[in-house]
Every structure is written in C-alpha cells, then in structure tokens.
Image: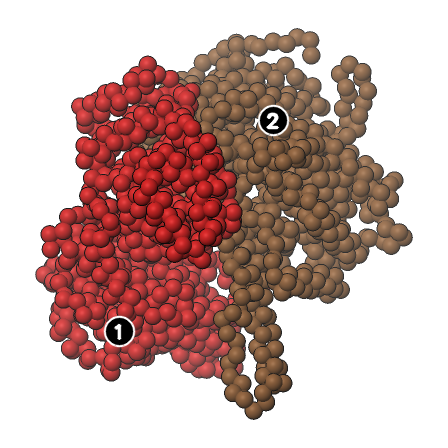
Chain colours: A brown, B red
C-alpha cells in the first residue's frame, strides 16, 4: 500500500459508475422526501423497465428510441402504481412502509418473469444507440459509458430544474415539509406524491438502461442490494433532502470505490479491505450528516421513527388473561408433543422455526420495543454461528450459548454506539452496511493480519464456501437426532420467551418503549437514555448470538451465502408480519415465513405468498400483523367464555333460587360489563 | 347578528325532531330509524313487477340494459370458447392465449372504477350507452385485424363495455324503479348471465361453425349498436329520487323531488364514505370469498374432473354447461323472495345471502367426495344455483345502504373485491394447497371458507338498519335545507348537522349541530380533548365525519378533500403548525397562491398584499421560514392563508405559544378580515381572549355541544366553565368586564346547578387529564396581570359555589 495513485482512466470510470449511483440516489431522495421512506424497490423499478426494453428491442425489433421511451413509460407507470398501492400506509409507522417497499421490490421482480416482459434471451448484450467510444491510456471506454456520460447529467439537470422552478416542484417540496399545511393551501399532496414516485420510476429506468450495457451478470441483477447501498450512502450524504448533493455524492462514491479498487489489489483480502473502507466511510457519512438532520421540521422522524406501532397491550380483565394463558399453555404443550409426531425433515423444520423465532424476538426487542430499526440482525446471528464454528467442538453447548450471546452482545453494542447519534431509518442504513460488511468481509476472510503489529487473527468462517460443525451433546444427551434438536430449540425458545416476559414485567421493556416514544420526556423522567438504548442493542445482540449458535448446530453446514443481507430483511419481515412489539407475533411471523414454505413445499406459489405479495398483503390489510388477529380471536373467545359462564351461573342461580319461577333469559345488559370493557379496550388500542 | 340563540339556529331542528319521533333505540349501537321510514319496506306483499315497472321508468330501460349486458357477456364468453381458433389465427402459444385472457380480465376490472366515477358524476344512462357503443363498434374491428397486438389493444379498450354492466346498470336500475321492486329488477337484469352462458355461447358457436370463420361470430357485437342508440333515449331518473319520495312520504313531509347540485366527490373520498357503511364491510368480505370460489372452481374444478373422474375436454365442457344452467333455478328464488324479505325487514335479504353462500360451500365440498359422477354434478348444480340469489341479495342491500350518488362506485367495489382480492388470492391459495396435497383437498377448502362468508353476512345484516338510517338522515337533511332555501332563508357560512366523528373506534364528536351565519365571529371553546380541533379538521376536509353533513356556504362538502374545500372559500389556520420551515418565506407565500398560480397578476397582487400585512416579512423573503421566530412564523402562516381571500376563516389557536403583543396584532388582522365580510371561527383555550373577538360562543365538552349562545351568557354558566377554566372566569371577574351581571348570574346558576357541577377541586372528565394544569398557564399572560387576579378570584369562586 505504498504507491497510491489515481490515473485519469480510473477517475473517469469512477465518475461513470458514480453517475449511476447519483441517479439512484436522487430517486431515493425524491421518494424519501414525499413518502418518508427508504424505497428499497428503487432499483427494481428500473430493472423491470430494462428487461422490458430488451424484450422490445430484440424480440419485437422496435428501434432503440421507441423501446427506451416505452420502457421509461412502463417504469413511470409502475412507479405511480406503487405509490397508489402504498398510499394506504401513509399514516402507519415508517418501518411498515419500509418493509412494504422490500415486498414491493420482490413483487416487481416477479414482473420481470411475466411472459410479455421477459425477453426470450436474458443474457444478450444490452442495446446501445451510439457507436462512439474513447480511450484514456490503454483503457477503452465502450459506447455504453459514453451514453452514461451524456445522458445522466442531462437527466439530473432537467430534474433539478423541474424541482427548483416548476410549481409541481414547489408543491413537492412543500408537501414533504408539512403535509397538512400544504393540503390546506390547496396543494394536491397525494397527486404530488404520485408525481414523485412517477419521476423516481423514470429515474430508475434511466439508471438501469444506462448501467445495463456494462453489466456482465444477469440483467435482472443490474441494481443489486450493494449497489443500492452505495446509492443510499450518496443519498444520505445529501441528508435525504438535497438532490444536488445526493447526485454529486453519488459521483464521489463511485470515484472512491474505483480508487480503492485500483489501489488495493491484494487478492486474498483486497475485496474485504475495500468493503471495510466503504463501510467506515458510510458510518462517517452518517455520523457527520446526522448533525445536520437535527434541525428542521423533521423532528418527528428523528425521535420516534417507529412509534405509532400497536400499543403495548395487556389484558385488563382476568378472564381475558386466563384465555391468553390457556392459549399459550396449550400451544407449548402441543409444540412439546409435536416432535413425537413429526418426520425427521419436519423436526428439522421445527427447530428452524424455533431458532428463527428467537432471532425475530431479538428484533422485537430492538425494533418493536426500542424503536431502533436494524437491517443487519442476521449479521449478528452470523457472529454467533461463527463462534459455534470455532468453538463448537471444544466448549460444551451450555457454556457456548451464553458465551456467544455475550460476545455478540458486545458486537451489537458497538453497532449500537452509532445509533446514539444516528437515528430512525439512518440506523437502518448503517446496519444494512454492517450486514454487507459482515458477509463479504469478516465472514468471508478466514484469517487476516493487522497492518502494523502483524498478528494474524482467524475470525472468519474457517471455510467460507462450506463450514461444517458437529452437533455436541447436552449433559450426555445426544442432540444429533432431528427430534432431539427440535426439543432443544423449543426449550431455548421457551426460555427466551420467559426471559422476555420478565423484561416486560420488570420494566425493562417499559423503559425501552419510553425512550422510543419520547426521548426527551423519558430522559426528564430519569431514564438514562443512552444506557437504555445500548441496553436494547445488548439484549438483542445477546439473543441473536445464542440463536446463531443454535442455527449453526441445526443446519450443520453453512457458508457466507447463509448470511446474505436479504436474510436480515426476511427477519424484519417476520417481525412486521407477526406484529411489531408482540412476543407471540414474532414467533408466528417466523412460523409463517419459515414454516409455511416447508409445509407446503417450496412451490412457486408458496414462495409468492411468503415473499413479496404475501408480505405486501399483510402490511396493507393487517397492519397490526398476526398478533392483531390473535388478540382479536382471544378477545372474542373471552367474550364467548364470559357469556357461557354467566349463562351457566344464571341458570344455576335460577335453579337454586326459584325452581318453579319464570327462569327466563336472565342475562341483562349490565352483566356484559367486564368482558365488554375488555373488548372495548382492545378495540381502542387497535 | 346572533342574539340569545333563538332564530336561525334552532330553526333547523326540524329534521331532528322528525327523526326523534321515528328513531328508536335498538339492540345495535346508535339510533336506528323506524322501519317505516326505510325505502322498500311496507305492509303486505310488494306490488307485482308490472306495477313496479309502470311506476318506474317503464319497460324499455330494463329490457335495453339486460340486452346490453347480454351482448357484452356473450362476446366475452364467446371469445373464451373461440380461444383455440384465436390462438391458431394469431400463432399464439398457450401461455400467450392465457396472457390475452389475463389482460382482458385486468382491463375489465380496471375500467370498472373510472366508468363508475363518470356514471356517478353525470348521466348514468349516457355512460351505459357510450360504453356499450364503444364495445359494439370495436369488437367487429377486432375481427378484422390480423396481428395479435392490435387485437389485444382493441380488446383492452372494448373492455370498457364490460366494466359498465355491473356498476352503471345496477346503479341506474336502482334509481329507475321503485325500491320495493329492486330484487326483481336486479334478478331480471342478471338473467343475462345464464342466458349468455347458454344461448349466447351456442349462438357464437353456431355462427363460427356455420361460416367456418371465428371472425364472423364477433360481428354479433353489432347488435349492441342499436341497443346503445336506444339507450340514449331512455329517461335519466334523479339519483335517489325513489328513496327521497319514500322517506319524505313516510315522514309526513311534502315531496319535492329536487336534485341538489352535488359537488364533485373524488373517488378516494367516495370510498371513504362507502366504507363507513358497516354492513358493506361484511358484504365485501363475503364477496371476496365468493370471488375466491368463483376463480378457483373454473381453474381447479376442471382439474378435479380430469384427475378424479378422468373426463375428456368435451365431457368436462358438458358438465360445466349443465352446472352453468343452474342460475335459471337460482334467480327465480331471488326474484320471488328478495323483495318480500326486504319489505318485511331490510336486513333479511342479507341473511338469505348468508344462507346461500354457506349452502354453496357445503354442497360444493360434499360433492367432491361423492361416489358417482351424477351425484357430484347434481350437488354442484345445487351449489351453483345457490350463488344466483346471493348476488341479488347483496345488490339489494348495497343499493339500499349506499348513498344514491355513489352507487355506481359502490357496485364497482363489489367487482374489485370479487375479482382482485377473492380471485387473485383465491387462485394462489388454492394453487398452493393443491400443489402441496391434491386438487380435491384444495377444493374442499371452499366449504369452510364459504361458511365463514355466510356467518359474516349474517353478522353484517345486523348493521343494515343503521346504515339505511344514515341514508335517511341525509335525505331529510337535504330536504330541510332545500325547504329553507326555498323559503328565502339566508345561506349560512357554515352548517354542521348531526355530526359524529370517530378516531378508530373512539368516538370524539357526538351529534354536533352548529350553524354560523355569514359575517359572524364565533369562538369554539372547550377543554382539551373536547373535539374543537377535530371539528375544524373535519370542516376543512382533513378528516371526514362518520355521520352527518357539513355545508360551507350551502354546499355539501362532507366528503370533499381539503384541496377542494379551499376553492369554496374556506381556510383553516392551525396555530404553530402551518409553515414550511425548509422553504424560504417567498416560497411559503407562493404555496399560498397555489390555487390560482396560473393567474399571475392575481398571484402577484396577493403576494404584495400578504407582505403588506406584515412588513417584517419583506426583509426576510429569501430566508428559510424555519429561521423565523414563532411569532413571525405565525404571521407568515396567517399571511399565506389570507392570500386566498377566504370567506370562512377557521383558526385553531391563534395564540399558540405566542407573546401577547403578537397575538394582539394577529387579532387585529382577524378583526379587519371580519369587518371586510369574512366569517371567522376561532378555537380558543382562553375565554378572555375569545371575548375580545367574538360575541357568540360555542362550548364543547367531551365531543358534545353544551352551550351555544352569546359569550356573555356563557360567562354566567358557571356550571360549564368552572370545572374547565377554573381561574379563567375569575380573572374576567377581576377585570370587571360585566362583573356585576356575571356575578349575579353566578349565584343563581351556582345554586341551580350545584348538584350537577362539582366544586373545582374535583378532577375533570377522563378525556382531558392535562386540562386543568394547562389553563392557569395559558391565562398567566392574558392582560399581563392575569396571574394575580386569577389567584385572587379562584377562592372567591369557591365560596360562591359552596352554599
């Protein structure tokens, strides 16, 4: 690492890549400003357009310009439709909306499979209308790059002018500042938001069409998560507000990336180093920009980004509580007996569901209770799994579980340190960065050497392609059988739930929620805000850590692919589907997303249900998640049981009091009071 | 001006009194109107269909619309039958043909809503005629093209004709014929369904085979042209005229069917209103369940016959044809029973619907396990027969519970739920189960799902009377309003009639009635959580009430959005929340001229005027508004609101967190605006400040209007004010503003209401725990020395109330 240089060819290449980041970043910012959500579907909007364009160009032999226009129109239409779809969530917690965009991106992926959009051949050179190319030194820039250099700045400038000078632009800015006030002034806020999404769709299409010619992998992966992450980095540098800053920051990110890759050429750990530096840059950007986010009208999102989740409900009537308890008891009993009935495969599945349940619960603590969004929870699980890979053979599992938990808790607290400064969805970005960094740098590098001390640490997976662990025994009981491990995982899950119940009852959860909902007031009430937040990360990390150990033993073999950042998104989906801040909800979510595919087989239909569309449907029509349904069922049961009890009591009294009397329908209105109020309370809180 | 609360305000209790007579408490929540008031109900048997037709618009509309639906349905079913030929002609793959069918289905759904919106805004018969004409003219052109893309494109456009038959036709028929014959009219119109599936398909098949060319069969659509042209000639009934005449006659009022000029309600707001119909929820869910079965059965039923009974394609077609005829059996049930049930009790048809859907599911599930094919077919025939009355029952209820001017959209929702939610989700779910197990198991699921649907319909039927009551209230309100206008009464700036408002399931406003004549300043007073802000938000269109009517300058704007309400000349200013901090002051003001931004001269004048009101803004035009002080921001907000020159200015806490000096200036502006003729509604926490502006006060407590009259009189109502404002009244006494009169009143009121109004230390009502704590602080800076006098006066009040 002596000769650091930046040849002009690398600079130009960086600018070209950066222009794409910039356009994506502008689209992200645009959507963020009007809908207050990081649009994880931003890349996918354009991919649909790019695929469609290839279809038109090659399969229908439509000329480039017409095909490009058609693709652009499609992307804009899809963007507008997405907004119409997500509009329902306008007043819901932002976490829901964000997860909805994750679902949306999966739905959009399905679009590319539709027969009238998918081209016959996906791996064909993407069309380019120009034939110009130029060379700097020995490096030849193909026509696609020339196109990017011409089109991207023009589009960016045009958009900037539109936002800056047109009434639509002003309306857009006004409605993002203060929605109600804009509406009261006659600005059609919803239409404005639709326009923003339409523009974002168009931008994404432009990006995809520009980026595709230089793409080597499949067309549908043109705008992958790590590319989106870098675009997010740029958008964050613009504080999710400034379009010009986002655009130029995108260019900067591209240049930095190329610069790093040019200078760090160590084949074994080079990529890891680049990732590390980019991750550090991301954190720095966040830390620096976080200060500028502290002013302006957007205090609401900084303080309690996920507030407005379902209220923390506790049954007020004794009967309702009894119903709940019996439900839980019955479930535990059934679950404990289940491995006796299940086949080996399904026992394995059951342990998977239990472990994912624990992981989801760890996110319930962090996101549901503490309001800190994490898109990197599975990376923490990776820490635990990594510990199991290294220590699984030597340390007994009873010790390994808490030990891995503690280590992961420390890592989690370190990640959480950034959260002291970075809030709301900015934390989502830094944790997503963490997830990518863990996967592609830490876990993928078996051993690394510190630069100055030259000491080698082996912290990664021993074999990134395929690491094996042997299942240990528990007090002499072998856990190698699937059934045995299912019981073990169930026991861990039950212990976890019991532990969380204690946290909930002893006030830890209360403090977390207080800080989530109103930091200032919580601080004023004597709750140490910083410590409470760190505690959330620590507790959550602890749970993720031992869940990781369990996961390692449950699967037995894993690779870096196991820790793909998309799995973290899956975990977030579990929590959202189950119901934020609900303990049984998280487990139900895990059951739905992990169990359902396995029960019904991995048919395309189940995949569809459990991903994208199912997720969207859940969020759109059951924002309270499965917990909401469960609570309602519980309430109804309580009402029914109450009615039966009363009728029974009335009959007994009638029988005892006046045997020959009228004995007519005794239950009167006042009788309904106890259960009625329970239901009333439940309704009020939904 | 308003004095003492007699003339203008209480004039309007007419409909309420009428309702009060008719309304009886039932076991359901809320008041429900007497059955006699409900359109379509009555004693004895309903009159025969011939009478119904004669009373209504005669034979032609029903016959023409049935024909129109027959033509479109026949062509669609025919294209399905001609699938193989079409596939061959355009060299399509199976998947390609499937894609065409998919696109057509999507188009049909997609057209439904826009067409319904047009129909609700304008003439329904014209919309029906135009859509049919487009269909009838385009389908023959489809027969002429030789490429698949033009074919698909034409099909997409022609699908507009399909989009109108369930929405526009049903909405038209609801108004064209008296309410007591609806089930029969709908059943008659629905006949097109089985007829097109039998006679229609045979016709298409015959033409195609006789000419040896499928393209000729599409020429059948040309029948639609004369039908469409004749449809233009049928009368256009007034929307809701049948309901109005029935209700007004039953309520003993003279009938003047007068179509009110209805403002343009947007689709979104219309849906908001429609989803307030509680029974509609249940109907839509069961419709979705029906769609679930309706999509699943053709797809997987065919698979069932193939796998379980090993039937060939031809035999399967025969089986489906036999089952398809079953509607001929089902529709007469609806025809003969529907109107009678409704006549006796309007919720009964829905119960019948619930039974039907449960029967359908039961028959169908059981049929799958029959040992002989004939048993299977018989049971499925019965099952299918049960679905025909179901849709009629739901149509009937929809027509009765939806506001007449939104009926087409309501029927449109029916289609959306059936096809999108039910159909789409149904296809996927059944597919998943079928893949995992087998097709029989998957189809068996239809049974329990339909049972749930049946239960839901029965549960939903409990709300039908309440929902019809809402329609009745609207009619009576409109009638009273029209009558008043005819009598030459002045049109008030703001009217609120019978308004209920909920946040979720929490009711915030209870039957609020309020009328504000033009040019007045009215103060809305009350505790925190009394519903003052909610009231203004509802008027400004930020939220919509769940019951009742809001009129601004006589225009019914209950379901208008705030973006539309500003055009009526009403503006809302919310204290402390109205600026755009990131935008410069100039840009803030440019937002103020947003509604007339194209009129540059006016925009410029408005901007100059706004800056003229507050000169300090001029120096800061290019500074972000977030950097202004709180007072300046409020000035900016007021300046911006003034730019539209509102005739009705609503202010929610003008003094929100501001210094007295600033408040004084802002209040001067408000006075000036009022002097220029604008009506002002002011939400205030402080009675003292309200007094300096307003002469009339409306006092809200826990969402109910407790007092409406002159503000001086309110000051005498110690029972109202004391638990709420505590020191506030005292400080008024201290400043000597009519002290003698007020104290005189005080003792009288105090003794009279002693048992009602607890002494001050008692906690306030539950919804407003922070109330008492907040008020002394508010009053501290009123008049500078307010704190001192307040403290002094509070014990005085206590002693006054003690004996």
Front residue of A247 and A66 = A247
Front residue of B173 and A346 = B173
Task: Name above or below for residue A284 compared with residue A611.
Answer: above
Q: Which residue is mark 2?
A: A421
| Residue A200 seen anywhere in this rendered image of the structure | no
Task: Name above or below for residue B482 compared with residue B631.
Answer: below
- The secondary element bearing badge 2 is classed as loop
Dot label at residue A3: none
Asked which quadrant contains residue A76, the reply is top left
Q: Residue at the spot x=38%, y=49% of the render? A: B747
Residue B449, horizontal then vertical, whole percent: 49, 67
| Chain bearing mark 2 | A
Q: Are marks 2 and 1 in contact (CB under 8 Å)?
A: no
User: Tag 2: Cα neighbours inside 10 Å, few (<14), some, or many (≥20)?
Assistant: some
Quarter containing the N terminus of chain A: top right
Task: Name above or below for residue A471 compared with residue A43.
Answer: below
Q: Residue at the spot x=63%, y=22% of the render? A: A280
Q: In front of the other: label 2 or label 1?
A: 1
Residues marked 2 and 1, same chain: no
| Chain bearing mark 1 | B
Q: Residue at the spot x=20%, y=32% of the render? A: B675
| Residue B329 seen anywhere in this rendered image of the structure | yes
Front residue of B711 and A120 = B711
Asked which quadrant contains residue A183, the reply is top left
Dot label at residue B36: 1
Q: Residue at the spot x=20%, y=23% of the render? A: B605
- The secondary element bearing badge 1 is classed as helix
Residue A393, horizontal then vertical, whole percent: 85, 41
């Amino acid at each position: 690492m002596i000769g650091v240089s930046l040849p002009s060819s690398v600079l130009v290449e960086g600018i070209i890549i950066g222009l794409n980041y910039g356009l994506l970043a502008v689209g992200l910012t645009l959507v963020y400003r009007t809908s207050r959500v990081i649009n994880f579907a931003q890349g996918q909007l354009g991919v649909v357009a790019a695929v469609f364009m290839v279809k038109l160009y090659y399969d229908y032999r439509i000329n480039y310009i017409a095909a490009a226009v058609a693709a652009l129109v499609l992307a804009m239409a899809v963007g507008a439709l997405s907004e119409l779809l997500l509009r329902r969530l306008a007043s819901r917690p932002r976490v829901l909306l964000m997860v909805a965009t994750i679902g949306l991106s999966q739905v959009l992926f399905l679009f590319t499979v539709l027969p009238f959009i998918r081209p016959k051949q996906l791996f064909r050179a993407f069309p380019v209308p120009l034939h110009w190319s130029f060379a700097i030194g020995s490096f030849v820039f193909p026509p696609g790059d020339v196109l990017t250099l011409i089109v991207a700045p023009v589009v960016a400038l045009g958009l900037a002018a539109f936002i800056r000078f047109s009434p639509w632009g002003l309306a857009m800015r006004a409605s993002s500042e203060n929605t109600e006030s804009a509406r009261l002034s006659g600005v059609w806020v919803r239409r404005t938001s639709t326009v923003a999404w339409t523009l974002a769709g168009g931008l994404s299409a432009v990006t995809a069409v520009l980026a595709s010619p230089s793409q080597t992998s499949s067309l549908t992966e043109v705008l992958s998560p790590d590319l989106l992450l870098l675009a997010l980095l740029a958008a964050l540098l613009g504080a999710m507000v400034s379009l010009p800053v986002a655009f130029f920051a995108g260019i900067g990110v591209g240049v930095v990336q190329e610069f790093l890759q040019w200078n760090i050429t160590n084949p074994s750990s080079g990529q890891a180093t680049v990732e590390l530096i980019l991750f550090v840059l991301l954190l720095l950007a966040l830390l620096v920009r976080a200060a500028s986010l502290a002013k302006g009208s957007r205090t609401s999102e900084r303080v309690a980004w996920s507030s407005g989740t379902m209220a923390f409900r506790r049954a007020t009537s004794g009967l309702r509580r009894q119903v709940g308890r019996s439900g839980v008891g019955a479930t535990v009993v059934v679950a404990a007996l289940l491995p006796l009935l299940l086949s080996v495969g399904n026992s394995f599945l059951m342990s998977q569901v239990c472990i994912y349940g624990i992981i989801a619960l760890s996110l319930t603590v962090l996101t549901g209770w503490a309001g800190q969004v994490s898109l990197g929870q599975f990376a923490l699980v990776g820490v635990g799994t990594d510990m199991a890979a290294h220590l699984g053979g030597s340390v007994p599992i009873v010790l390994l579980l808490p030990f891995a938990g503690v280590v992961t808790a420390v890592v989690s607290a370190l990640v959480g340190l950034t959260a002291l400064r970075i809030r709301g969805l900015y934390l989502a970005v830094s944790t997503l960065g963490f997830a990518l960094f863990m996967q592609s740098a830490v876990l993928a590098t078996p051993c690394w050497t510190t630069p100055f001390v030259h000491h080698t640490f082996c912290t990664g997976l021993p074999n990134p392609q395929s690491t094996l662990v042997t299942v240990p025994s528990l007090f002499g009981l072998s856990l190698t059988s699937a059934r045995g491990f299912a019981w073990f995982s169930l026991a861990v899950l039950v212990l976890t739930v019991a532990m969380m119940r204690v946290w909930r009852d002893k006030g830890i959860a209360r403090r977390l929620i207080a800080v989530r909902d109103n930091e200032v007031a919580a601080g004023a009430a004597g709750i140490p805000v910083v410590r409470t937040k760190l505690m959330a990360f620590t507790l959550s990390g602890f749970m993720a850590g031992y869940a990781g150990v369990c996961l390692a033993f449950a699967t037995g073999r894993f690779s870096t692919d196991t820790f793909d950042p998309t799995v973290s998104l899956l975990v977030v989906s579990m929590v959202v589907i189950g119901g934020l801040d609900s303990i049984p909800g998280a487990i139900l979510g895990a059951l739905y997303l992990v169990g359902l595919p396995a029960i019904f087989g991995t048919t395309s239909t189940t995949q569809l249900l459990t991903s994208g569309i199912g997720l969207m449907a859940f969020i759109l029509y059951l924002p309270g998640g499965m917990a909401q349904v469960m609570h309602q069922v519980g309430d109804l049961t309580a009402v029914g049981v109450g009615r039966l009890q009363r009728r029974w009591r009335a009959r007994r009294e009638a029988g005892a009091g006046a045997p020959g009397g009228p004995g007519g329908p005794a239950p009167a209105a006042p009788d309904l009071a106890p259960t009625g109020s329970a239901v009333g309370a439940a309704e009020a809180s939904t | 001006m308003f004095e003492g609360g007699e003339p203008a305000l209480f004039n309007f209790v007419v409909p309420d009194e009428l309702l009060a007579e008719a309304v009886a408490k039932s076991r359901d929540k809320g008041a429900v109107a007497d059955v006699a008031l409900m359109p379509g109900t009555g004693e004895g048997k309903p009159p025969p269909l011939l009478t119904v037709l004669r009373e209504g618009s005669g034979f032609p509309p029903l016959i023409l619309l049935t024909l129109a639906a027959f033509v479109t349905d026949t062509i669609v079913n025919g294209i399905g039958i001609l699938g193989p030929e079409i596939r061959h002609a355009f060299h399509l793959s199976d998947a390609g043909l499937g894609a065409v069918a998919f696109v057509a289905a999507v188009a049909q759904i997609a057209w439904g809503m826009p067409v319904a919106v047009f129909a609700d805004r304008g003439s329904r018969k014209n919309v029906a005629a135009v859509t049919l004409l487009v269909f009838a003219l385009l389908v023959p052109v489809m027969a002429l093209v030789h490429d698949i893309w033009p074919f698909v494109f034409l099909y997409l456009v022609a699908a507009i004709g399909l989009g109108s038959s369930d929405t526009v036709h049903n909405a038209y028929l609801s108004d064209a014929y008296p309410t007591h014959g609806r089930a029969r009219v709908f059943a008659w119109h629905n006949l097109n369904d089985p007829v097109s599936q039998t006679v229609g398909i045979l016709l298409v098949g015959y033409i195609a085979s006789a000419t040896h060319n499928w393209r000729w069969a599409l020429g059948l659509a040309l029948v639609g042209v004369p039908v469409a042209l004749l449809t233009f000639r049928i009368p256009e009934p007034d929307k809701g005229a049948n309901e109005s005449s029935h209700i007004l006659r039953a309520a003993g009022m003279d009938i003047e069917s007068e179509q009110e000029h209805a403002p343009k309600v947007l689709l979104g707001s219309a849906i908001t209103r429609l989803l307030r119909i509680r029974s509609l929820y249940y109907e839509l869910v069961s419709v979705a369940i029906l769609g679930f079965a309706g999509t699943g059965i053709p797809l997987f039923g065919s698979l069932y016959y193939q796998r379980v009974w090993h039937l060939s394609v031809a035999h399967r077609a025969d089986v489906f044809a036999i089952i398809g005829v079953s509607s001929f059996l089902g529709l007469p049930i609806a025809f003969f029973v529907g109107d009678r049930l409704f006549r006796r009790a309007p919720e009964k048809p829905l119960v019948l619907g619930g039974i039907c859907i449960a029967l359908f599911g039961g028959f169908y599930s059981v049929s799958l396990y029959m040992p002989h094919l004939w048993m299977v077919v018989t049971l499925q025939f019965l099952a299918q027969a049960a679905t025909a009355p179901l849709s009629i029952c739901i149509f009937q209820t929809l027509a009765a519970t939806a506001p007449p001017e939104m009926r087409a959209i309501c029927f449109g929702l029916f289609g959306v739920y059936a096809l999108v939610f039910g159909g789409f989700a149904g296809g996927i779910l059944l597919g998943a189960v079928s893949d995992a197990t087998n097709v029989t198991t998957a189809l068996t699921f239809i049974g329990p799902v339909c049972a749930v649907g049946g239960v839901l319909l029965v549960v939903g039927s409990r709300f039908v009377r309440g929902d019809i009551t809402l329609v009745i209230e609207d009619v009576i309100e409109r009638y009273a309003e029209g009558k008043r206008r005819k009598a030459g009464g002045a049109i008030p700036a703001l009217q609120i009639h019978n308004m209920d408002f909920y946040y979720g399931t929490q009711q915030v406003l209870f039957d609020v009635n309020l009328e504000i004549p033009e040019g007045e300043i009215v103060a809305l007073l009350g505790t925190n959580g009394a519903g003052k802000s909610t009231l203004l938000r509802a008027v400004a269109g930020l939220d919509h009430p769940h019951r009742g009517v809001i009129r601004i300058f006589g225009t019914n704007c209950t379901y208008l959005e705030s973006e539309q309400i500003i055009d009526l000349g009403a503006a809302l200013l919310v204290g402390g929340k109205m600026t755009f901090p990131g935008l410069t002051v100039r840009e803030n003001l440019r937002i103020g001229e947003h509604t007339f931004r194209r009129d540059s001269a006016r925009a410029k004048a408005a901007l100059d005027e706004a800056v003229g009101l507050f000169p300090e803004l001029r120096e800061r035009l290019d500074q972000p508004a977030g950097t202004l002080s709180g007072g300046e921001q409020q000035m900016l907000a007021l300046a911006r609101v003034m730019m539209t020159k509102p005739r009705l200015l609503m202010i929610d806490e003008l003094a929100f967190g501001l210094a007295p000096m600033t408040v004084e200036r802002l209040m001067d502006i408000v006075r000036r605006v009022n002097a220029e003729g604008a009506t002002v509604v002011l939400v205030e926490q402080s009675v003292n400040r309200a007094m300096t502006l307003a002469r009339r006060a409306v006092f809200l407590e826990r969402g109910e209007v407790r007092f409406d009259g002159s503000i001086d009189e309110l000051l005498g109502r110690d029972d109202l004010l004391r638990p709420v404002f505590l020191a506030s009244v005292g400080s008024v006494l201290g400043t000597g503003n009519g002290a003698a009169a007020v104290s005189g009143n005080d003792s009288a009121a105090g003794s009279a209401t002693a048992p009602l109004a607890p002494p001050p230390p008692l906690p306030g009502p539950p919804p407003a725990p922070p109330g008492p704590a907040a008020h002394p602080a508010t009053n501290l800076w009123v008049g500078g020395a307010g704190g001192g006098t307040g403290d002094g006066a509070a014990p005085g009040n206590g002693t006054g109330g003690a004996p």
